[in-house]
Image: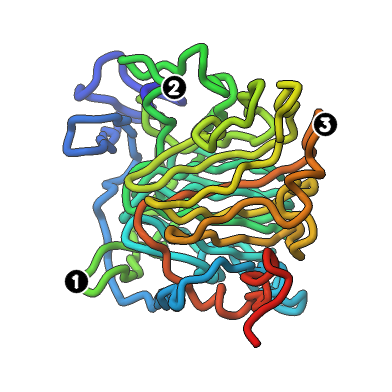
């Protein structure tokens, strides 16, 4: 987004000589989106950023998917995926287990305590939500501190690594596009407007350069191939963390869900009122603790609705989600409500919500406009009885 930052040592004029203390010429790199026609930043490297000495195949974790067929709403229990015994040897990059995916987004989950390899996703932006724990995210732009409730936005092709501080639970949304605030929240020049539920003060980017020394450094790169998503392991001649300064409007940042100010009204607000970000063919929404509808005859939980154009994915990360009480859903659950299925509150929740003034719930929602398929992680942690909870019985 068009929010300018300046970090470290840069020259007064772009595309001009920039030299170090001993007269050495720094290498300028333009990192830009959409073919020089959208947001960009200029980075100044101590070494040539293109210098690789080896390339080999990186065998990715299982990215195969299975159609949601027969079509059903589903409940996934993500906390069943990572036994305590494996967490110490798991990292945030290679340890991800694919939950859901389509041609626009892949959603994965990981519980990790080990430092990740250096990594770059050249397919699209990544938005990683921290369910619990804390980490330092080291990037070519500098370091970010990430804590519980943070979204960590990593722009496409940003080299970075994750260093957990103990056990870290992370929900990774990997786009095949860029992830940005909704256009209706932005001025024509890119500033967040007064009607937006957050502002630039809530976005926390790197504050100083991060320099590291070393030669023959491995970097894992996820990129596009003829058969879909593939991986390459580069060996760089010099450490990629060699940027002495940068400026521009493209960089990684954190945004904490507690800084999202909910939009409420006299009657129930539709899901777009909860939107925080969007990518090509999907949106990301926040359901946070909030005062609820104050019309004297309001029904605060959602009305029943048919997702005729989208699949709705809710990741429950705190509180007690009012509309799902009695379904078995809890902390760490995902509900999948696909297009073609009318869904809404569990039995009793509709009436029970009448008169409520406040909901203490916290959830991250992804709505996609193409159907999602199930990854191996979803198949490993499904609550098979969820689809029948509205009726109170399943197939005979």
Q: CA distance from mark 1 to mark 2?
A: 37 Å
The residue at 49%/61% (across/down) is 341
Coordinates of residue 165 in the picture (x, y in percent): 72, 53
The residue at 68%/61% (across/down) is 333
Residue hosting label 3: 355
In the rendered structure, find residue 243 and report the number of the disc placed on it.
none
The residue at 78%/52% (across/down) is 348
Badge 1 marks a residue whose secondary structure is loop
Image-quadrant location for residue 222:
bottom left
* 288 vs 189, nearest the viewer: 288
Residue hosting label 2: 185
Tell me the quadrant of the picture where the C terminus can be found. bottom right
Q: Residue furthest bottom?
A: 396
Image-quadrant location for residue 356:
top right
Q: Residues within 10 Å of mark 2 (few under 14, many from 20)?
A: many
Q: Could you tell which of marks 3 and 1 lies nearer the N-terminus? A: 1
Asked if residue 29 shows in the view, the reply is no
Horizontal relation, residue 252 to residue 318: left or right: left
Q: In the image, which is nearer the foreground, mark 1 or mark 2?
A: 2
Badge 2 marks a residue whose secondary structure is helix
Asked if residue 342 shows in the view, the reply is yes
């Amino acid at each position: 987004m068009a929010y300018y930052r300046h970090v470290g040592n840069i020259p007064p004029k772009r595309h001009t000589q920039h030299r170090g203390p001993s007269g050495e010429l720094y290498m300028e790199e333009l990192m830009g989106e959409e073919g020089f026609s959208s947001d960009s930043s200029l980075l100044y490297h101590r070494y040539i950023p293109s210098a690789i000495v080896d390339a080999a195949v990186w065998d990715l974790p299982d990215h195969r998917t299975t159609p949601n067929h027969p079509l059903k709403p589903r409940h996934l229990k993500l906390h069943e995926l990572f036994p305590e015994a494996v967490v110490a040897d798991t990292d945030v990059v290679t340890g991800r287990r694919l939950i859901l995916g389509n041609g626009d987004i892949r959603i994965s989950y990981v519980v990790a305590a080990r430092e990740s390899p250096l990594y770059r996703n050249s397919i699209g932006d990544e938005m990683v939500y921290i369910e619990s724990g804390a980490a330092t995210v080291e990037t070519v732009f500098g370091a970010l501190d990430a804590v519980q409730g943070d979204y960590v936005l990593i722009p496409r092709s940003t080299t970075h690594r994750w260093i957990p501080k103990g056990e870290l639970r992370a929900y990774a949304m990997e786009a095949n596009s860029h992830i940005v605030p909704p256009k209706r929240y932005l001025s024509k020049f890119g500033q967040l407007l007064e009607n937006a539920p957050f502002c630039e003060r809530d976005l926390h980017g790197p504050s100083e350069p991060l320099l590291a020394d070393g030669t023959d450094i491995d970097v894992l790169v996820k990129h596009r191939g003829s058969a879909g998503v593939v991986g390459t392991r580069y060996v760089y001649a010099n450490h990629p963390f060699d940027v002495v300064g940068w400026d521009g409007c493209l960089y990684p940042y954190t945004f904490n869900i507690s800084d999202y100010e909910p939009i409420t009204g006299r009657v129930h607000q539709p899901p777009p009122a909860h939107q925080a970000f969007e990518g090509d063919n999907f949106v990301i929404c926040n359901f946070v603790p909030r005062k609820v509808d104050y019309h004297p005859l309001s029904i605060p939980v959602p009305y029943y609705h048919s997702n005729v154009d989208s699949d709705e994915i809710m990741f429950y990360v705190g509180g007690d989600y009012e509309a799902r009480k009695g379904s078995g859903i809890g902390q760490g659950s995902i509900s999948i409500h696909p297009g073609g299925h009318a869904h809404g509150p569990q039995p009793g929740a509709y009436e029970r919500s009448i008169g409520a003034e406040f909901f203490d719930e916290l959830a991250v929602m992804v709505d996609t406009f193409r159907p999602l398929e199930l990854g191996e992680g979803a198949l490993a942690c499904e609550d098979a009885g969820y689809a029948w909870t509205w009726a109170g019985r399943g197939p005979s």
